[in-house]
Amino acid sequence: MLDVARHFVPLPEIKRLLDGMALLRLNVLHIHLTDDQGWRFESLKWPKLTTVGGTRAQTVVGLPGNYGSEDLHPENYKNVYDGVPHSGFYTQAELRELVAYAKTKNVTLIPEVDMPGHMRAARAAYPELGYDGVQWGVGTGWGVYREVLRVDELGLRFCTDILGEICDVFDAPYIHIGGDECPKVEWADSEVAREQLKELGGDPHNLESFDKLQRWFTAQMAEFLATRGRKLLGWDEIIDGGVPGDCVVMAWRTWTKPAERAVKLGVPIVQAPTTLYFDHAQGPVEDEPISIGPGATLEDVYKYDPLEGVSDRPDLVLGLQAQMWSEYIPTTEHLWYMAFPRLIAVADIGYYGTKRVPYDEFLAALPERVKALEALGLVGHPLPKAAA
């Protein structure tokens, strides 16, 4: 998964990544096109999404916002900003070209438009997409924003308009709608949302009960995508209020055991745990560039088992995915540094499964494989000493 919302990645560099993926026999690129900090997909029906939502005033370069906090907004006094506007979006014609190019590499492009949370950029472009109509700016901090989408008639029309355009551009069998990190505070404050929840049999005085409202919203999106011959894909939060129809779950929140929960419900999954979050450092944080925090080493990644906890239903495990969130990845040089060689390990897990060679043999072969990637301009993190 490539996050182009936090930091825009030029089209030629995405093609370079596709070249590297083909070399490793990786077959899916999931593109995270929208978030609080930028909207990168050109909509012909809602044009201000890119003319307004495609630019943020500045970017956090120092301490991040207090992740998950109810006390501090993501844009808080601890943040250090660069004071430089950040812009970019892809036209529909460019994305069609990218889809065609990916096909020549045997790679499927799966687009993601995050909803109903992570909508600050969309709300900046169209304030009416929130219940209160407040004019916000495009997000400049990192973290979870309280500003989310209204999910009544207007919100549904907005989403089906966008997903319709997405389906016109991308031909993947799956369309990702995000569904992650959607605070329910605004919904709980809205009489419209509270009445919707009552009709669904929920308790408007219980914040957790609003998971039912998100489930209802997600089910509407699944039904719409089905009319276009597509299946809904979302982060594991989409099943918190119950299964929203025919869908696939990307299991990321390891602390909630989402893979196990989904499989018990008969829902197919893609394994995307924090071990595979490549925006996290691949060594001691004091020795690495600024990142979200400590993460998995190359060895940790190579030894990851995507069937752990769900080995009784391997038929429901569609694959695994590495995540490249780009909050602290402002350049493609940094992107390659964070992605490789860990992405080689992911490729081997996906391609060979339990038949992959022991880690020491993998290391021994790594220098030659890295040379092939470097020939494409994909220069990654220095190899472990045993493989250098």
Image: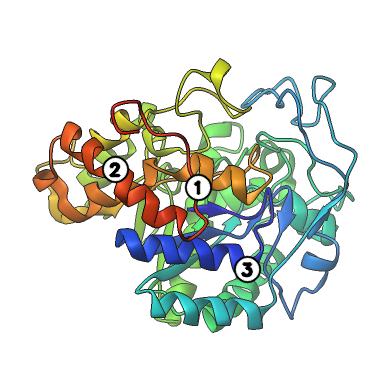
Q: Tell me which amino acid carries mark 2.
A: Leu
C-beta proximity under 8 Å, tags 2 and 1: no
Q: Residues within 10 Å of mark 1 (few under 14, many from 20)?
A: many
Q: Is residue 27 visible?
A: no
Residue that mark 3 sits on:
11
Q: Position of residue 352 (x, y in %)?
A: 16, 52
Please give the name of the residue rendered at 49% of the width and 53% of the height, measured from the top-left corner. 378
Rendering quarter of residue 9: bottom right
SS of the residue under disc 1: loop
Please give the name of the residue rendered at 78% of the width and 44% of the height, measured from the top-left corner. 139
Rendering quarter of residue 152: bottom right
Please give the name of the residue rendered at 63% of the width and 48% of the height, measured from the top-left corner. 117
**Sequence-earlier tag: 1 or 3:** 3
- Is residue 192 left or right of 114 when viewed as pictured? right
Q: Is residue 158 visible?
A: yes
**Sequence-earlier tag: 2 or 3:** 3
Q: Position of residue 101 (x, y in %)?
A: 48, 79
Residue that mark 2 sits on:
366
- Relative to 385, residue 364 above or below: below
User: In this orientation, which residue lies closer to the viewer: 58 or 160?
Assistant: 58
Q: Residues within 10 Å of mark 2 (few under 14, many from 20)?
A: some
**Sequence-earlier tag: 2 or 1:** 2
Q: Tell me which amino acid carries mark 1.
A: Val
Labelled disc at residue 379 = 1
SS of the residue under disc 3: helix
Q: CA distance from mark 2 to mark 3?
A: 28 Å
User: In this orientation, which residue lies closer to the viewer: 158 or 317?
Assistant: 317
- Relative to 221, residue 289 above or below: above
Q: CA distance from mark 2 to mark 1?
A: 13 Å
- Relative to 13, residue 242 above or below: above
Which mark is in front, 2 or 3?
2
